Image (cartoon, grey):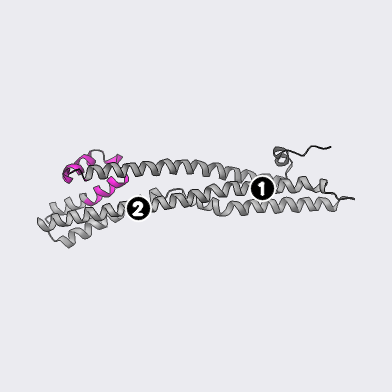
């Protein structure tokens, strides 16, 4: 009784095009896993940075002193520190220029923080489009390899005098591996994208809430001053 071919043997005996499809899907899957771990640790770090900064911010520290500390390490600021430095730095610049209109001051402060928030959103969402692309296209790429492999299998049947299941089964099996690899690449990418997109949204809401709180504090300072 003939032993069934292993998966590695099926891959090795597949047509060059099907092998190319499998190689593309394997590379896409590996790249997705690298990005998944990178985003996982990166977003966890950002959440910790927000917690640490907000704890210091609400500890009663003088905001000018806090901004001075951040200015000393300007090239090594975290995301929320960048938002604070943008808003408070603009407030100090306008105060030094003698601007006393609260509405004008807040308008410029909010604009500076919006720019910082936009940059931070881009940074948090880095590589997510790649995961979305892998998740949405890998299955179809795998199906393309499967269709091509099955087509070749049936073409070979046409040249046989007696077609049997044993003759076509290996070709169909190697073709179906492409679909399996497409699913293997797509499922983690879709889960990772959805998970990280939701976390980015939560983190951005925390940034925006902090920006609103800082705006209120500075507005009261301008009015009182």
Q: How packed is label 2: few (under 14 Cα within 10 Å), some, or many (20 or more)?
A: some
SS category of the residue bearing label 1: helix
Rendered location of residue 66, percent (x, y): 20, 42
Residue under label 2: 204
Position of the N terminus by quadrant? top right
Rendered location of residue 9, percent (x, y): 73, 38
Q: Is residue 89 left or right of residue 147?
A: left
Rendered location of residue 54, percent (x, y): 26, 45
Q: Residue at x 77, y 45 (%)?
A: 170
SS category of the residue bearing label 2: helix
Label located before the other in sequence (1 or 2): 1
Corner quadrant of residue 77: top left
Q: Residue 178, labelled with which disc? A: 1
Q: Is residue 147 left or right of residue 90?
A: right
Q: Residue at x 73, y 46 (%)?
A: 173
Residue 33 or 14: which is nearer the viewer?
33
Q: Is residue 104 visible?
A: yes
Marker count (numbered):
2
């Amino acid at each position: 009784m003939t032993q069934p071919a292993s998966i590695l043997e099926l891959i090795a005996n597949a047509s060059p095009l099907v092998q190319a499809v499998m190689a593309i899907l394997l590379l896409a899957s590996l790249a997705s896993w690298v990005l998944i771990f990178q985003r996982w640790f990166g977003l966890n770090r950002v959440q910790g940075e927000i917690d640490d900064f907000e704890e210091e911010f609400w500890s009663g520290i003088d905001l000018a002193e806090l901004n001075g500390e951040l200015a000393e390490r300007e090239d090594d600021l975290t995301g929320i520190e960048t938002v604070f430095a943008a808003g408070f730095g603009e407030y100090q610049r306008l105060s030094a220029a003698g601007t006393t209109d609260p509405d004008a001051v807040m308008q410029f402060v909010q604009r500076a923080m919006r720019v910082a928030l936009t940059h931070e959103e881009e940074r948090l969402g880095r590589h997510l489009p790649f995961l979305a692309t892998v998740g949405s296209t890998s299955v179809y790429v795998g199906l393309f390899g499967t269709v091509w492999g099955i087509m070749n299998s049936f073409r070979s049947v046409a040249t046989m005098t007696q077609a049997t299941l044993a003759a076509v089964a290996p070709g169909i099996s190697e073709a179906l591996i492409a679909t399996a690899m497409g699913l293997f690449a797509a499922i983690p990418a879709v889960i990772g994208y959805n998970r990280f997109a939701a976390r980015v949204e939560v983190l951005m809401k925390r940034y925006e809430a902090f920006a609103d709180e800082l705006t209120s504090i500075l507005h009261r300072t301008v009015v009182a001053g």
